[in-house]
Image (cartoon, grey):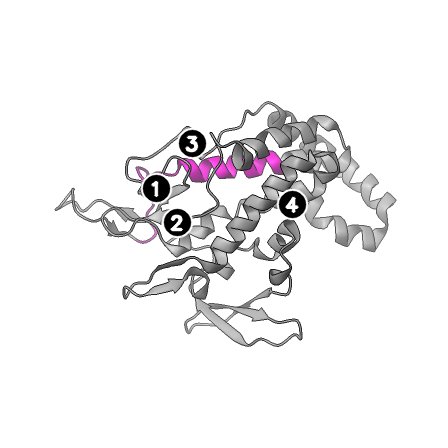
């Protein structure tokens, strides 16, 4: 719900007119939006530096998570983890993922309330969190997911770890919604952070199952990180502005989903196979 106002604004204003739309959403969502923003205004920033895991191969500022379905080997507790598909291990490290979800909830609530009423309390609270996550060198997160979705004893991070940052969608949208009241210098640094992340996302190479190096977007990437189309506008990176993503579902045969990357002429020169979108592996 927290992104409903931002997500539907464009469609609704064109279908019904700005005045009618604003009146309708205020009548329908005012109470729930105000309840969420009251909570958001009370939340202090908490970034990836607040909690760390001794199993992480990264540093204090690196996002780290572990694959949900991987468990200790009961016959060799010090050995590599084994997969138990569909069964989440409650002892795996998820604190960074939870912190990012919390950030998305806070920013979404602030931006939704701002759409109803551009109160400076909302933009000022958003700035606190933006500075902590993307600006302050003591608390900021590094713009990469190198150590996400790690598996103990097997791999220090996987390309599919980019699924953990789908929650940045709310952050990107919130900045765009509230930018008129946000400090320009802070927004510039936040844009720079997302620009570096976009570069990492489209250029970083990771180990494949057969040991060869590959760019993460070749298989795991684009359909797993749905905010990608929003990043060029946020970062103002024109080279990426023409990249479109379309999802196509197929019946029983693999791959169940592919991502088609279209060029400016509407042609699709490449088709990228990948596993089911949003599935934890």
Q: Secondary structure at mark 3?
A: helix
Q: What residue does disc 3 label?
A: 49
Q: Secondary structure at mark 4?
A: helix
Q: Is 220 in the magenta?
A: no
How far is mark 2 from mark 4, CA to CA? 24 Å
Q: Residue at x 50, y 61 (%)?
A: 222
How far is mark 2 from mark 3, CA to CA? 16 Å
CB-based contact (under 8 Å), mark 4 and mark 1: no
Q: Is residue 154 left or right of residue 123?
A: left
Q: Is residue 119 above or below residue 115?
A: above
- The quarter of the image holding the N terminus is top right
At which x and y percent is residue 80? 20, 49
- The quarter of the image holding the C terminus is bottom left
CB-based contact (under 8 Å), mark 2 and mark 3: no
Q: Secondary structure at mark 2?
A: loop
Q: In the rendered structure, which disc, 1 or 3, sits on the residue that comes first in sequence?
A: 3
Q: In the rendered structure, which disc, 2 or 3, sits on the residue that comes first in sequence?
A: 3
How far is mark 4 from mark 1, CA to CA? 29 Å
Q: Is residue 76 left or right of residue 10?
A: left
Q: In the rendered structure, which disc, 2 or 4, sits on the residue that comes first in sequence?
A: 2
Q: In the rendered structure, which disc, 4 or 1, sits on the residue that comes first in sequence?
A: 1
Q: What residue does disc 2 label?
A: 146
Please tell me which residue lies in front, 88 or 66.
66
Q: Is residue 101 left or right of residue 128?
A: left
Q: What residue does disc 4 label?
A: 173
Q: In the rendered structure, which disc, 3 or 4, sits on the residue that comes first in sequence?
A: 3
At which x and y percent is residue 198? 53, 53
Q: Secondary structure at mark 1?
A: loop
Q: What residue does disc 1 label?
A: 58
CB-based contact (under 8 Å), mark 2 and mark 1: yes
At which x and y percent is residue 55? 28, 39
How far is mark 1 from mark 3, CA to CA? 12 Å
């Amino acid at each position: 719900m927290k992104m409903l106002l931002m997500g539907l604004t464009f469609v609704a204003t064109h279908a019904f007119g700005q005045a009618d739309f604003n009146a309708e959403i205020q009548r329908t969502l005012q109470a729930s939006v105000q309840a969420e923003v009251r909570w958001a205004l009370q939340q202090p920033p908490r970034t990836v530096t607040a909690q760390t895991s001794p199993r992480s191969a990264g540093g204090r500022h690196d996002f780290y998570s572990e694959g949900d379905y991987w468990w200790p080997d009961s016959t060799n507790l010090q050995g590599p983890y084994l997969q138990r598909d569909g069964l989440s291990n409650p002892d795996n490290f998820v604190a960074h993922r939870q912190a990012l979800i919390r950030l998305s909830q806070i920013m979404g609530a602030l931006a939704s309330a701002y759409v109803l009423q551009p109160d400076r309390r909302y933009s000022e609270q958003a700035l606190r969190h933006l500075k902590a996550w993307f600006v302050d060198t003591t608390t900021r997160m590094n713009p990469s997911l190198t150590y996400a979705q790690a598996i103990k004893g097997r791999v220090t991070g996987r390309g599919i770890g980019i699924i953990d940052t789908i929650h940045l969608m709310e952050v990107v949208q919130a900045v765009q919604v509230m930018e008129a009241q946000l400090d320009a210098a802070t927004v510039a640094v936040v844009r720079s952070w997302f620009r570096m992340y976009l570069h990492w996302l489209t250029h970083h190479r990771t180990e494949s199952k057969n040991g060869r190096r590959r760019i993460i977007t070749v298989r795991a990437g684009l359909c797993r990180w749905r905010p990608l189309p929003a990043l060029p506008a946020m970062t103002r990176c024109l080279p990426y502005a023409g990249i479109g993503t379309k999802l196509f579902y197929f019946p029983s045969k693999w791959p169940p989903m592919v991502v088609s990357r279209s060029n400016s002429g509407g042609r699709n020169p490449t088709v990228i196979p990948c596993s089911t979108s949003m599935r934890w592996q």
